[in-house]
Amino acid sequence: MNARTRTALAALTVSTGLVLAGCGDASAGAEGSDHGSADPPATVSGPANPYSGLHLQQPYQKPSFTLTDTTGAPYDFAARTAAGPTLLFFGYTNCPDVCPTTMADVMVGLRTVDPAVAAATTVVFVTTDPARDTPPVLGAFLDQFDADLPTQFVGLTGDQAQVEAAQLAAGVPLAEDMGQTHSALLLLYGTDGEADIAFDAENSGRDIAHDLALVAAG
């Protein structure tokens, strides 16, 4: 797939506010959703795009929600991620492909970027399968990716209603099939509370590192 084709496809999928991935299944679906309380749909910028990821001309607004972290304590997402860049992803620990691949890309990105930027970045993984992803399960899954990094990944869970509310607040589609069909977007927020950039399966760890550096410098 060439860059022009990918940009066109990205504009089509992200303009709906959604990208759904069926983990372990080549099929994927999409349905409408808002990415902010009253925002128009996101679109992808044209040739002037300075980012390696998907540049959202209508940024996603950082959501407010409180879930349970891997220690069993409440975690206020907006308050705890205010100080630096934030990467947010919704997925589940039993996912055979998209979720571990995305976390591995984040790991590579944080190893590649300036260590000071990596240390200032918060990575949050919210489960779409709260019935199985207890705090200890989430912690064991994320420990595979952050062991040698200057920042520890945050795993969040809650009851089904809380997890669904968090997805809606973030502007991603509600996961389906017991959490196995979920948003494939990795959102990158700056300290201004907006995500101008998202990453998908076509992006690499180096793409994440490149855009993290830009967001941190801005």
Image (cartoon, rainbow, N blue to C red):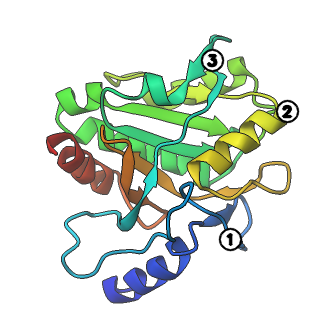
Residue under label 2, please give it. 131
Image coords of residue 119 (percent x, y): 28, 25
Where disc 3 sits, the SS reads loop
Q: Report the front residue among 40 and 102.
A: 40
Residue under the point 68% across and 12% down = 72
Q: Are marks 2 and 1 in contact (CB under 8 Å)?
A: no
Q: Classify 82 as above or below 31.
A: above
- Which residue, given by chain and number where applicable, does mark 1 sit on? 32
Q: Position of residue 19 (x, y in %)?
A: 59, 66
- At label 1, counting other C-alpha atoms closer than 10 Å, the crowd grade (few under 14, some 14-19, many 20 or more) is few
Q: Judging from the image, what secondary structure is the residue with disc 2 in?
A: loop
Residue 70 numbered tag: 3
Quadrant placement of the N terminus: bottom left
> Which of the marked residues, 3 or 1, is nearer the chain's N terminus?
1
For the residues labelled 3 and 1, the Cα–Cα distance comes to 31 Å
Asked if residue 40 can be seen in this view, the reply is yes
Foreground disc of the pair 3, 1: 1
Mark 3: give few (<14), some (14-19) or many (20+) Cα within 10 Å: many
Q: Position of residue 152 (x, y in %)?
A: 43, 22
Q: Amino acid type of disc 2?
A: Ala
Vertical side of 92 occupied by 115: above or below:
above
Secondary structure beneath dot 1 equals: loop
Mark 2 or mark 3, which is nearer the start of the sequence? Answer: 3
Amino acid identity at mark 1: Gly
